[in-house]
Each structure stands twice: as C-alpha cells, then as structure tokens.
Image (tube, rainbow, N blue to C red):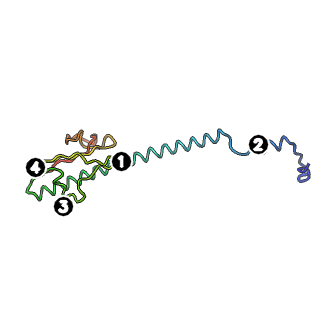
Amino acid sequence: MIFNKLLPNTVFHRSQISQRTSQSGFTLLELLVVVSIIGILIALIAAGFSTAQSRGRDARRRGDIKSMQSGFEQYYAVNNGSYNTCVLMATAAYLPAGLPLDPQTGTAYSCTGSATTYCTCGLMEGGSGGNASNSTCTFVSGASGTYFCAQALQ
C-alpha cells in the first residue's frame, strides 16, 4: 500500500480511512441548534427595537403637545387674553410648521378650542404614560393615562 511506504510503522486499513473521512463537517442536529439559537436572538433584538420605536414616538407626541401648548399660550398673550380655534391659533407666528401630526398615523392630534380654553391630546402607543384617560382632557393622577393632553394654562 502507498500509505505503508509513507509511514512504514503504521498499518492503515480501509475501515480506518473511511471512518476518518466520513466524520468531517457538522451533523444536522448541530446545525439545527445553531440556527435556532440565532433565531431566538433575532426575535429578542426585534422585540427590543420595536419597543424603543414606540417609546420614541410617545416622546415625540409629548413634545408636540407641549409645543402646541406653548404656541397657544403665546397666542393668548398677544390677543388680549383670548384663545381661538386650534387651526386659527396655529399661525406662522406661534406654530411655524402648523399643527403637528401624529408620528405613527400622520393624522392631526385631537384639538378643540374656544375663546376661553383649549384642549389638545395625543393617544399614547404604549397604552400608558399619559396624563389623561380620554381625548377631552379628563386628567388622571400619575402616568397611567392612555392620552397625553394639554389644556389652557390661563
């Protein structure tokens, strides 16, 4: 045999050679375990990313509502202590970009206004973290509401 010439003190049999060559690579079970672990990791990362996006949109809603409140209060100060409808108060001087839109739906926030008061609300995505229980400025204690609202400060 050719193997005996290369290594004279070692005797190789056909069964030993075939055993060594058939054991290379991974088994199907090993591949399934690795693929399932990778799948679980991807699922965990995707869930965390989705939660982070939701929190980011909720933070933007709070910021938008506070900006509207600030603009409406400026309108009140300039217009002799009187509010108006939300659309009329959202002029270039007070809200230069106009009334902001919900970052997820692209629709306008709930907003009502009169000469004496206003109420503007946005539905929180996480189901909590707001300060109101509905879009008519019914405020609740803590951060257990499903809406974040702002009303007239004067």
Task: Name the front one of labels 2 and 3.
Answer: 3
Residue hosting label 4: 115
Task: Name the front one of labels 1 and 3.
Answer: 3
SS at mark 3 in the image: loop
Residue hosting label 2: 22
Q: Position of residue 18 (x, y in %)?
A: 81, 42
Residue hosting label 1: 55
Report the residue at 36% width, 46% height from top.
54
Report the residue at 52% width, 44% height from top.
41
Report the residue at 12% width, 47% height from top.
114
Q: Position of residue 116 (x, y in %)?
A: 10, 48
Quadrant of the rendered image containing residue 134: top left
Q: Amino acid at mark 4?
A: Ala
Task: Name the front one of labels 1 and 4.
Answer: 4
Q: Amino acid at mark 1?
A: Arg
In the image, taking residue 144 as reference, residue 47 lies left or right, namely right
Q: Amino acid at mark 2?
A: Ser
Could you tell me how far apart the alpha carbons at marks 1 and 4 are, in whole angstroms? 34 Å
Q: Mark 4 or mark 3: which comes first in sequence?
A: 3
Label 2 Cα crowd, 10 Å radius (few <14 / some 14-19 / many 20+): few
Q: Position of residue 38 (x, y in %)?
A: 55, 44
Could you tell me how far apart the alpha carbons at marks 2 and 3 are, in whole angstroms? 79 Å
Q: Position of residue 85 (x, y in %)?
A: 15, 50
Q: Mark 4 or mark 2: which comes first in sequence?
A: 2
Task: Name the front one of labels 4 and 2.
Answer: 4
Q: Mark 1 or mark 4: which comes first in sequence?
A: 1
Could you tell me how far apart the alpha carbons at marks 1 and 3 are, in whole angstroms? 30 Å
Label 3 Cα crowd, 10 Å radius (few <14 / some 14-19 / many 20+): few
